Image (cartoon, grey):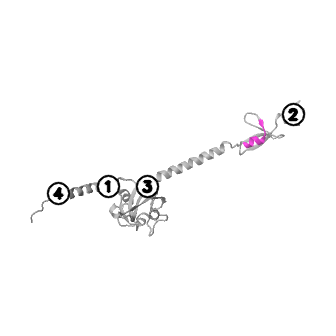
Amino acid sequence: MPCRRKTGNDAGNDALNERLGHSLREWTATFDAIDDFVSVHDRTFRIVRANRALARFLGLHPRDLIGRRCYEVLHGRDDPWPECPHVKALEVQKTVSVEIEDPRVGRPLLVTCSPFFDEEGNLSGSVHVARDISAQKEAETERERLIAELQQAMSTVKMLTGILPICAGCKKIRDGQGQWQPIEGYIADHSQAEFTHGICPECRHRLYPEFTR
Protein backbone atom coordinates (compact mmCIF):
# COMPACT_ATOMS: atom_id res chain seq x y z
CA MET A 1 0.00 0.00 0.00
CA PRO A 2 1.57 3.29 -1.04
CA CYS A 3 2.57 5.67 1.74
CA ARG A 4 0.57 8.86 1.96
CA ARG A 5 2.65 11.97 1.54
CA LYS A 6 2.39 14.37 4.47
CA THR A 7 0.50 17.52 3.74
CA GLY A 8 1.03 20.94 5.18
CA ASN A 9 -1.71 20.26 7.72
CA ASP A 10 0.02 17.07 8.85
CA ALA A 11 3.28 18.93 9.35
CA GLY A 12 1.47 21.63 11.29
CA ASN A 13 -0.20 19.06 13.52
CA ASP A 14 3.13 17.34 14.16
CA ALA A 15 4.69 20.65 15.16
CA LEU A 16 1.75 21.45 17.42
CA ASN A 17 1.92 18.03 19.06
CA GLU A 18 5.64 18.45 19.59
CA ARG A 19 5.12 21.82 21.26
CA LEU A 20 2.36 20.42 23.44
CA GLY A 21 4.52 17.48 24.41
CA HIS A 22 7.41 19.80 25.23
CA SER A 23 5.14 22.03 27.35
CA LEU A 24 3.75 18.99 29.17
CA ARG A 25 7.24 17.71 29.94
CA GLU A 26 8.28 21.13 31.23
CA TRP A 27 5.14 21.38 33.38
CA THR A 28 5.68 17.88 34.77
CA ALA A 29 9.33 18.66 35.56
CA THR A 30 8.29 21.83 37.39
CA PHE A 31 5.49 20.00 39.21
CA ASP A 32 7.88 17.31 40.41
CA ALA A 33 10.58 19.83 41.40
CA ILE A 34 8.39 21.35 44.11
CA ASP A 35 9.38 20.22 47.62
CA ASP A 36 5.87 20.74 49.00
CA PHE A 37 3.39 17.89 48.73
CA VAL A 38 1.29 18.89 45.72
CA SER A 39 -1.70 17.00 44.37
CA VAL A 40 -4.86 17.62 42.38
CA HIS A 41 -8.13 16.25 43.79
CA ASP A 42 -11.49 15.95 42.10
CA ARG A 43 -14.78 16.69 43.84
CA THR A 44 -15.02 13.10 45.16
CA PHE A 45 -11.64 13.39 46.96
CA ARG A 46 -9.89 11.19 44.38
CA ILE A 47 -6.33 12.13 43.52
CA VAL A 48 -6.02 13.10 39.88
CA ARG A 49 -2.34 13.99 39.96
CA ALA A 50 0.44 13.94 42.57
CA ASN A 51 4.01 15.19 42.50
CA ARG A 52 7.07 13.14 43.38
CA ALA A 53 7.55 14.81 46.78
CA LEU A 54 4.19 13.55 48.00
CA ALA A 55 4.67 10.10 46.50
CA ARG A 56 8.18 9.83 47.99
CA PHE A 57 6.88 10.82 51.41
CA LEU A 58 4.24 8.09 51.21
CA GLY A 59 6.75 5.56 49.85
CA LEU A 60 4.85 5.21 46.58
CA HIS A 61 5.15 6.11 42.91
CA PRO A 62 2.98 9.04 41.75
CA ARG A 63 0.96 6.72 39.50
CA ASP A 64 0.08 4.59 42.54
CA LEU A 65 -1.82 7.53 44.02
CA ILE A 66 -4.02 8.24 41.01
CA GLY A 67 -7.67 7.39 41.64
CA ARG A 68 -7.26 6.88 45.40
CA ARG A 69 -9.08 9.07 47.89
CA CYS A 70 -6.84 11.52 49.70
CA TYR A 71 -8.17 10.84 53.20
CA GLU A 72 -7.52 7.12 52.79
CA VAL A 73 -3.95 7.61 51.59
CA LEU A 74 -2.89 10.45 53.88
CA HIS A 75 -4.90 9.83 57.05
CA GLY A 76 -5.94 6.18 56.87
CA ARG A 77 -9.57 7.20 57.31
CA ASP A 78 -12.82 6.13 55.73
CA ASP A 79 -14.14 9.68 55.68
CA PRO A 80 -12.68 13.17 55.19
CA TRP A 81 -10.43 14.72 57.81
CA PRO A 82 -12.33 17.00 60.25
CA GLU A 83 -12.19 20.60 59.04
CA CYS A 84 -10.89 19.32 55.70
CA PRO A 85 -9.62 22.28 53.62
CA HIS A 86 -10.66 20.53 50.39
CA VAL A 87 -14.27 20.44 51.61
CA LYS A 88 -14.13 24.08 52.69
CA ALA A 89 -12.54 25.19 49.42
CA LEU A 90 -15.30 23.52 47.43
CA GLU A 91 -17.97 25.04 49.67
CA VAL A 92 -16.75 28.64 49.54
CA GLN A 93 -15.07 28.28 46.12
CA LYS A 94 -12.06 30.19 47.43
CA THR A 95 -8.58 29.25 48.57
CA VAL A 96 -8.55 27.84 52.12
CA SER A 97 -5.55 27.15 54.39
CA VAL A 98 -5.64 24.93 57.48
CA GLU A 99 -2.94 23.64 59.83
CA ILE A 100 -3.21 19.88 60.25
CA GLU A 101 -1.40 17.77 62.84
CA ASP A 102 -2.09 14.09 62.29
CA PRO A 103 0.03 11.54 64.21
CA ARG A 104 -0.22 9.27 61.19
CA VAL A 105 1.43 11.92 59.02
CA GLY A 106 4.06 12.51 61.70
CA ARG A 107 4.64 16.20 61.06
CA PRO A 108 2.58 19.41 61.15
CA LEU A 109 1.38 20.55 57.73
CA LEU A 110 -0.02 23.80 56.44
CA VAL A 111 -2.52 22.62 53.84
CA THR A 112 -3.79 25.04 51.19
CA CYS A 113 -6.58 24.05 48.81
CA SER A 114 -7.47 26.18 45.81
CA PRO A 115 -10.57 25.28 43.77
CA PHE A 116 -10.32 24.97 39.98
CA PHE A 117 -12.98 24.98 37.27
CA ASP A 118 -13.44 23.43 33.85
CA GLU A 119 -13.79 25.38 30.60
CA GLU A 120 -17.51 25.82 31.20
CA GLY A 121 -16.99 27.24 34.66
CA ASN A 122 -18.06 24.14 36.56
CA LEU A 123 -16.27 23.36 39.83
CA SER A 124 -13.99 20.39 39.20
CA GLY A 125 -11.92 19.99 42.37
CA SER A 126 -8.99 21.61 44.12
CA VAL A 127 -5.22 21.89 43.97
CA HIS A 128 -3.89 20.60 47.27
CA VAL A 129 -0.55 21.94 48.58
CA ALA A 130 0.75 20.64 51.92
CA ARG A 131 3.83 22.33 53.38
CA ASP A 132 5.88 20.86 56.22
CA ILE A 133 5.97 23.51 58.96
CA SER A 134 7.96 21.51 61.52
CA ALA A 135 10.78 24.07 61.52
CA GLN A 136 8.37 26.96 62.04
CA LYS A 137 6.64 25.11 64.88
CA GLU A 138 9.97 24.39 66.55
CA ALA A 139 10.96 28.04 66.17
CA GLU A 140 7.64 29.14 67.70
CA THR A 141 8.12 26.75 70.62
CA GLU A 142 11.66 28.02 71.19
CA ARG A 143 10.49 31.63 70.99
CA GLU A 144 7.73 30.98 73.51
CA ARG A 145 10.26 29.29 75.81
CA LEU A 146 12.61 32.27 75.59
CA ILE A 147 9.75 34.70 76.21
CA ALA A 148 8.70 32.71 79.28
CA GLU A 149 12.28 32.73 80.56
CA LEU A 150 12.55 36.46 79.95
CA GLN A 151 9.27 37.11 81.74
CA GLN A 152 10.43 34.99 84.66
CA ALA A 153 13.72 36.88 84.76
CA MET A 154 11.93 40.23 84.63
CA SER A 155 9.59 39.15 87.43
CA THR A 156 12.53 38.31 89.67
CA VAL A 157 14.58 41.42 88.95
CA LYS A 158 12.75 43.27 91.73
CA MET A 159 12.36 40.23 93.96
CA LEU A 160 14.16 40.75 97.25
CA THR A 161 15.29 37.70 99.17
CA GLY A 162 17.35 37.40 102.31
CA ILE A 163 17.32 39.50 105.48
CA LEU A 164 16.25 43.14 105.62
CA PRO A 165 17.39 45.50 108.40
CA ILE A 166 14.20 47.20 109.61
CA CYS A 167 13.84 49.75 112.38
CA ALA A 168 11.99 48.27 115.36
CA GLY A 169 10.50 51.67 116.17
CA CYS A 170 9.51 53.49 112.99
CA LYS A 171 9.72 50.45 110.72
CA LYS A 172 12.04 52.15 108.27
CA ILE A 173 14.24 49.87 106.21
CA ARG A 174 17.96 50.34 105.63
CA ASP A 175 18.78 49.80 101.96
CA GLY A 176 21.99 48.65 100.35
CA GLN A 177 23.42 52.16 100.44
CA GLY A 178 22.88 52.45 104.18
CA GLN A 179 19.93 54.81 103.81
CA TRP A 180 16.77 54.37 105.88
CA GLN A 181 13.49 54.71 104.02
CA PRO A 182 9.82 54.03 104.83
CA ILE A 183 8.79 50.44 104.52
CA GLU A 184 5.91 51.31 102.19
CA GLY A 185 8.21 52.77 99.56
CA TYR A 186 10.70 49.97 99.89
CA ILE A 187 8.18 47.14 99.61
CA ALA A 188 6.57 48.90 96.64
CA ASP A 189 9.84 48.38 94.76
CA HIS A 190 10.29 44.78 95.80
CA SER A 191 8.15 41.71 96.02
CA GLN A 192 9.40 39.02 98.42
CA ALA A 193 11.55 39.50 101.52
CA GLU A 194 12.32 38.31 105.03
CA PHE A 195 12.65 40.90 107.79
CA THR A 196 14.97 41.29 110.72
CA HIS A 197 14.98 44.20 113.15
CA GLY A 198 17.37 47.03 113.79
CA ILE A 199 16.90 50.65 114.94
CA CYS A 200 17.56 53.89 113.15
CA PRO A 201 19.34 56.88 114.78
CA GLU A 202 16.12 58.92 115.13
CA CYS A 203 14.34 56.15 117.01
CA ARG A 204 17.38 55.42 119.16
CA HIS A 205 17.46 59.07 120.27
CA ARG A 206 13.69 59.11 120.92
CA LEU A 207 13.40 55.78 122.66
CA TYR A 208 16.78 55.54 124.43
CA PRO A 209 18.02 59.09 125.11
CA GLU A 210 20.43 57.86 127.81
CA PHE A 211 22.35 55.86 125.28
CA THR A 212 22.43 58.82 122.95
CA ARG A 213 24.24 60.90 125.62
Q: Mark 3 highlights which residue?
A: 131
Label 3 sits on a secondary structure element that is strand
Q: Residue furthest right?
A: 210
Q: Which residues are magenta?
A: 180-188
Asked if residue 69 is positioned above or below residue 197 in the image, the reply reads: below
Q: Mark 2 highlights which residue?
A: 205
Q: Mark 1 highlights which residue?
A: 27
Q: Earlier in the sequence, mark 3 or mark 4?
A: 4
The residue that appears at 56% across and 49% down in the rendered structure is: 145
Label 1 sits on a secondary structure element that is helix
Q: Is residue 107 visible?
A: no
Front position in the image: 147 or 6:
6
Q: Earlier in the sequence, mark 1 or mark 4?
A: 4
> Which circle marks residue 8 in the picture?
4
Amino acid type for the residue under numbered disc 1: Trp
Dot 3 and dot 4 residues touching (CB under 8 Å):
no
Residue 64 x/y as whole percent: 34, 64
Amino acid type for the residue under numbered disc 3: Arg
Amino acid type for the residue under numbered disc 4: Gly
